[in-house]
Image (cartoon, rainbow, N blue to C red):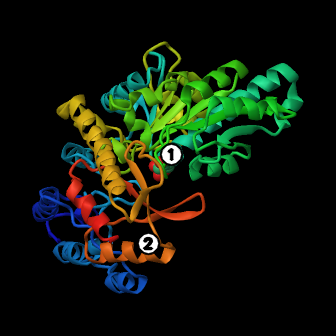
Amino acid sequence: MTDDAVPAQQRMHHYDESLTRLILDYVQERLSLPETPLDHPGDKRTVDELLAGLITREGTDPAKVIALYDEHLSKTVLSADSPRYFAFIPAAPTKASLLFDMVVSAASLQGISWLEAAGAVGAENQALRWIADAAGLPASAGGAFVSGGSAGNLSALVVARDTARRRLVERDGDQARYRRLRFAVSDQAHSSVKNTLSIIDCDPFVVRTADHRFTGEALRAALEADPDPETVVAVVATSGTTNAGIVDDLRGIGEVARERGMWFHVDGAYGGAGLFAPSVRPLYDGIELADSMIVDPHKWLFAPYDCAALLYREPWLAKRVHTQDASYLDAIHHDDGSYEWNPTDYAYHLTRRARGLPLWFSLVVNGTRAYEDAIEHSISLAHQVAADIEAADHLELVRDPSLSVVMFRRKGWGPDDYQAWCDRLLADQTAFITSTTWEGETVGRFAFIHPNTTIEMAREVLAATA
Ligand SMILES: *Cc1c(COP(=O)(O)O)cnc(C)c1O
């Protein structure tokens, strides 16, 4: 690493041909693997031993560090982008998006403002527009890419709270500022929504669901039965629950929200991608009524971590809440009517990676049809696997598959049997799959995202239940 011609303080910033080759070769090898290996969980002692003493005053030969990473550390990282990864929500970033992610890194794009990154922000907004159009949001809609669905839900629900509070204060005067506000959610809402409500100090107004799907009818009945429905200022629906893939009754809920002046937020972190699959698009009817919505491209839109799209019907409401005022930031805000779109104004962040660009690049080079095909693959795979389950005497569907999630029961199994089955499959690298809980019962669950997943891979998992 040392080069005597380079001043000491510049050593780290000097172009290093061999380091560059080393990293690009590693990346090339990883990208060219026909199938990413699943790999294994790591225990703390092993990881600690691998890392012990690595940070030194003089630095360590990068070839040694990459070898350590490649041969040891990375082996304790489960590959979410393996086509045999069926747990939680898998990942399957496109090659184009992964490569362009490196471009974003190499360019140190500061994605805060139009002033600093016009071309990057414009490109990100083009990708956001693609999502807004699929949802049927008006031309005014816009937002920003944030780090994940949790960050998106938090940013949107802060806007919901402040917008409602402002309205109450305008109508009832200053004491309305201290009223406790409630958000209608179903018992199936994602954990990040519950966290958000705790962070923003609002209470959940939990609506019980029949068969786990939140409907406008259930919302209306719950509000009518409540002594103080006015304090329920917003409603959160899910377009694709993480556990079961259920899309709520978006039209029904959206209409109740409109009637009562409530903010309507749609959490499509996982399932929002189904907007692009013609076979399931009708399930999303009513999403165009949303005041805000999120979709995680790092889940089912094949972008690298971390990337969530956050959209508002009326972005100026979000800007009013999230714009950070600091004298050193004056230069990014103009009131002279010139076009400015500062992604920082639409969420709680300031500095941000232009993390929508890998999606944008992939979308542009691959075309939207490729996205449609890849999403439909997982939906049809879920149906094929469900048919296999129905045909097997010892297996049973827990419910019909929704989107790309299949839940099933192995007759006679308890939690320990499922755990042993999961452990075995991971140990022999057949699959990474975990059980889940459904109505108090431990059951098996597949989540499909990867277009390279085949029915044969899923059948190996089912065969291991025999
Ligand atoms: C994954 C998920 C989230 C959280 O998204 P992160 O990107 O993990 O922060 C929120 N809601 C739903 C429905 C999800 O599936």
Position of residue 268 relative to residue 405, above or below, is above
Q: Residue at x 23, y 44 (%)?
A: 100
Q: Quadrant of the N terminus?
A: bottom left
Q: Position of residue 80 (x, y in %)?
A: 32, 59
Task: Choose between 16 and 4: the one closer to the eye.
Answer: 16
Query: Element type at marker 2?
Result: helix
Residue lying furthest front:
393
**Amino acid type, label 2:** Tyr
Disc 1 and disc 2: Cα gap in Å? 22 Å
Q: In this orientation, does residue 90 appear?
A: no
Would you place residue 359 above or below residue 89 in this image?
above
Residue 294 image point, x, y percent: 48, 37
Earlier in the chain: of badge 1 and badge 2, it is 1
Q: Is residue 64 left or right of residue 283?
A: left
Residue located 73% across and 47% down the image = 201
| Residue 418 numbered tag | 2
Residue drawn 49% across and 52% down?
Answer: 243
In this rendering, the count of numbered labels is: 2
Q: In screen coordinates, is 211 left or right of 241?
A: right
The answer to whether the beta carbon of the residue marked 2 is less than 8 Å from any atom of ligand 1 is: no
> Dot 2: within a 10 Å radius of its alpha carbon, few (fewer than 14), some, or many (20 or more) residues?
many
**Where is residue 99 shown, x and y percent of the image?**
20, 47
What amino acid does circle 1 point to? Answer: Thr
Q: Is residue 409 above or below residue 371?
A: below
Helix, strand or loop at label 1? It is loop
Q: Position of residue 374 (x, y in %)?
A: 25, 40
* Residue that badge 1 annotates: 241
Q: Residues within 10 Å of mark 1 (few under 14, many from 20)?
A: many
Depth check, front residue: 225 or 132: 225
Q: Is residue 173 above or below residue 104?
A: above
Which corner quadrant holds the C terminus? bottom left
- Does the beta carbon at disc 1 come under 8 Å from ligand 1? yes
